[in-house]
Image: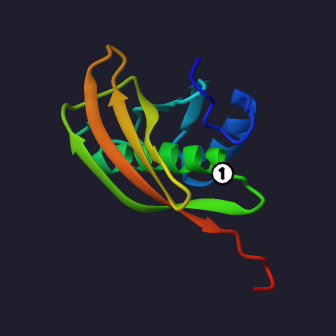
Amino acid sequence: MKKMIWHKTYTLEEVNDIFAKNMTGYLEIRAVAISHESLIVSMPVNDRVKQPYGLLHGGASVVLAESVGSIASNLVVDHDAFMGVGMEVNANHLRPVWDGEVRALCRPLHLGAKSHVWDIRIEDQKGNLVCVSRLTVAIVKRRNAND
C-alpha cells in the first residue's frame, strides 16, 4: 500500500469547508474524493465560469487547477508551521465544455521541503480530457501576526 501524502487524515467535509470560502466558494468548487495520494474536485459549468461565447472559460480552468493544487499542498504540510503558495501554473486547454460539470484530478509529481509540483487533469462528465495543468507551490514558514 502506498503511503498517505497528507499531514493527517482529512474528511471530505473538512476539505469542503476550505473550498466553501472565497473564490472557490463563489465558483462552487467542491471536493468529491480524497485518496492516500490524490484529491478530486468538481466545478459546475455555469454562467459564472463561461466566456462570452458560452463555453468554459480557460481562466476558470486555471482557477480550478491552481485552487485544487494549492489546497492539496496545504493539506500535505504542517498547517501550524508552514503554508503553500502558488508560484507558477500552466495549462493546456484541449477541448471545449459547454455545460454540466468538470472534475479535476490532482496528484503530486514532487513533494519537497520547499516546493511541491502537482499534475492536474480536468475532465468533462464523459471523461474527456479538457485541460492539463501543472502547478508549482512554494512551501514557506507561516509568519506570526506580529512579524
Residue at (73, 55) in percent of width and height? 79
Q: Residue 12, located in which quarter of the rendered image?
A: top right
Residue with the most extreme bottom position? 147
Residue with the most extreme right position? 146
Q: How many marks?
A: 1
Residue at (66, 69) in percent of width and height? 141
The residue wearing badge 1 is: 77
Residue 80's x, y, as percent? 78, 59
Name the element at disc 1: loop
Residue at (41, 55) in percent of width and height? 136
**Quadrant in the picture for the C terminus:** bottom right
Residue 94's x, y, as percent? 18, 34
Q: Residue 118, located in which quarter of the rendered image?
A: top left
Q: Relative to 56, is 79 above or below?
A: below
Residue 87's x, y, as percent? 42, 64
As rendered, which of 103 and 53 lies closer to the eye?
A: 103
**Quadrant in the picture for the N terminus:** top right
Q: Is residue 52 visible?
A: no
Residue at (66, 51) in percent of width and height? 77
Q: Relative to 64, is 4 above or below?
A: above
Q: Is residue 31 left or right of residue 13?
A: left
As rendered, which of 64 and 117 lies closer to the eye?
A: 117
Q: Is residue 126 visible?
A: yes
Report the amino acid beneath label 1. Val
Residue with the most extreme top position? 126
Q: Is residue 71 left or right of residue 51?
A: right
